[in-house]
Image: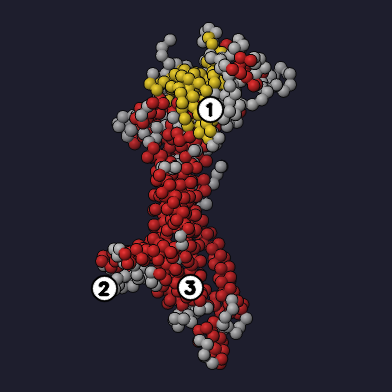
Amino acid sequence: MDNPILDIRDLHVWYRTYGGYAKVLDGVNLFVHKGEKVGLVGEAGCGKTTTMRSVLRILPESQVHTPRGQILYHGQDILQMNQRELHHVRTGGVSMIFQEPAAALNPVFTVGTQITDVIKYSGLSKQEKQKDNIKNLAMQAISEVYIADPERIMNSYPNQLSGGMKQRICIAMAIVTARELLIADEPGTALDVTIQDQVHKLLRGLVEKKGMSLIMITHSLGVAREMTDRIYVMYAGNIVEVAKSGDLFRKPRHPYTLGLLESVPKLTGGGMAEGIYGQIPDYLRPPGGCRFHPRCPRAIARCQEEKPNLADLGDGHQVACFQV
Amino acid sequence: MNLRAYILKRLFLSIFVLIGLSIVIFIIARVVPGDPARMALGPRAPQYAVDQLRQEMNLDQPLPTQYYYWVKGVLVGDLGKSLTTKRAVADDVKEFLPATLELAFIAAIFVVIFSIILGTLAAKYRNKWVDTVIRVMAYTGVAVPAFVLAVLFLLLFGYIWPVIPVLGRLSPEIMPPPTITGLITVDSLITGDLSAFWDALKHLILPALALAMGPLFQEARIVRSAMTDNMSKDYLAAAVGYGIPSSVIMRKYLLKPSLIPAVSVMGLDIASLMGNAFLVEVIFNWPGISRYGMEAMLRKDLNAISAVIIVFGVIFVLVNIIVDLIVAYLDPRIRLGGKV
């Protein structure tokens, strides 16, 4: 296979807090190939968003410390890039859609202003950045996310639009100029279930049409299965299992993945799902060894001492656990 | 709601505010101890003269009747006679108001410009030395009263380093322009007298700065905190992520939403500038209405007190309507209502 577009290696990201460093990411490994759709699954607070915001370097820099790791974009480390190179990645490489569309749009500027500014400061040539062309591109992007009457929408403020419309606008802003990789951070979570489904379908259609790669962050295994080719399961800042989407559901190996699957309510009865006992650890004092061991039903003494690495099970299936 | 209907509604409602204000100030001025007629005539005047003046001023009538007479006069532009200047209060207001208006206007410009600049700088370099310097300046500026600053300015620029005029509205050697609006800067511009304009402007700088210092730093702090708050918003992370340059983000996507809370407070502070100006006016020998009002209060000059307070009330109301319009312009959520 050819080289990945994005290759995150052993990424550690810590937050500075009054109590010391919150060691959130503890060696994340993740890659995406061209045209591939990848899911990143895990419960709230496990570091999914932190990982992805690191890719665009939009975490608050004064509060973040990156002691180790690389984020290679076509082989070049984003963490080491200067502003010019970074601008290049942001305007032509990677774009991101946020979980809360109401918060991701500036409330005091029209949709048109915000979307045309994205084009205006992109890497397009001067000729392409003529006023008429910018407007055309913006209108085109708005039509592409199936919004009727783009002209009127351009003159609207975000609070005049519904949640689903806002999320479509965010998607339009993310694809208005060509990008290789789209990161969608739980794009449906803040929306109604019916709208959520529409947004997911729209997203998948656009990514496939434009030949983009997709990283889909979600806490829903169902969404991940539907949308992606490969799934990364994340727990407390570690990738614990990677597999092709089908394989992960057919033969999950990591105890955490098993727990996640069991906690999905089933239509065939059995009542309320069990869920996983306990909660995400305190990142100021994370447990040693495998971070999942305090909650793991199969933990052994070794799990407290040593951190398991991802071990290959063949066909791209990898698990970080001593017990498999 | 369209703009005209909104303004008309606000103006209509403010009539009630002003009526309420006039009643309150009318009563307060009259119930505080001291006989205005006696104070006006001095301790050695005979009792019958005092009684006669009381009768002339309707002070022997019950309060509601007095108020009735007063309102009747106000409605035809007669604010009564001042006991101190022995002139019609309306003439006094006409003479003293422009000086304070001019002073407060320049001070307001200082407040707006410097609070935005300093607040933005402090937010941009937050927790760096620039921020620390501005913070110390702000605490000092807010804590030190305007009249202390006024005295310091006087000492510094009047005595130690006399580069700028410190007293009055014009230098004695400059011919004052003919009174058209009463605002010397405007009048001199209308008549094309640039040297008078320049001189008047120089005279305005120090008193306006002394007056503006407190609100200016107060607002700079508000701008800073609104900006740092908004920095952690998703829409800013998104804008950065889309590759919008940081300079554009600072002055456009961050500044506009951050100005909304600051402008509301600025409005209140700017509207209060005129009333707060009296010590600055005293120190800089500024013939303004604030000083006139304070002297009227000390002498229980009833008509002058009421007139000054009502004038301040009208200005306060107008400034606040303007500020609300500016906020509505900045914030479409207020302007358009709609779903939030």
Residue in the foreground of this view, choosing between A310 and B29? A310
Residue A19 appearing in the image? yes
The image shows residue B140, relative to residue A102, as above or below, that is: below
Q: Inspect this view and state whether residue A199 appears.
A: no
Residue placed farthest to the top in the image? A314
Taking the spot 54% from the left edge, 46% from the top edge, the residue there is B337
Task: Look at the picture and state if B132 lies above or below B294.
Answer: above
Q: Find residue A157 and report its horizontal and vertical position in percent.
A: 48, 41
Q: Nearer the viewer, mark 1 or mark 3?
A: 1
Residue ID at (32%, 67%): B159
Type of the residue with mark 2: Glu
**Are the residues tagged 3 and 2 within 8 Å (C-beta)?**
no
Residue type indicated by callout 3: Met
Q: Chain of mark 3?
A: B
Q: Position of residue A83 (x, y in %)?
A: 36, 31
Of A101 and A85, which appears nearest the observer?
Answer: A85
Marks counted in the figure total 3
Q: Which residue is mark 3?
A: B294
Residue marked by disc 1: A23
Tell me the SS state at disc 2: loop
Q: How far apart are the two marked residues, 2 and 1, measured between alpha carbons?
A: 73 Å
Tell me whether circle 2 and circle 1 mark residues in contact (CB < 8 Å): no
Q: In the rendered structure, which disc, 3 or 2, sits on the residue that comes first in sequence?
A: 2
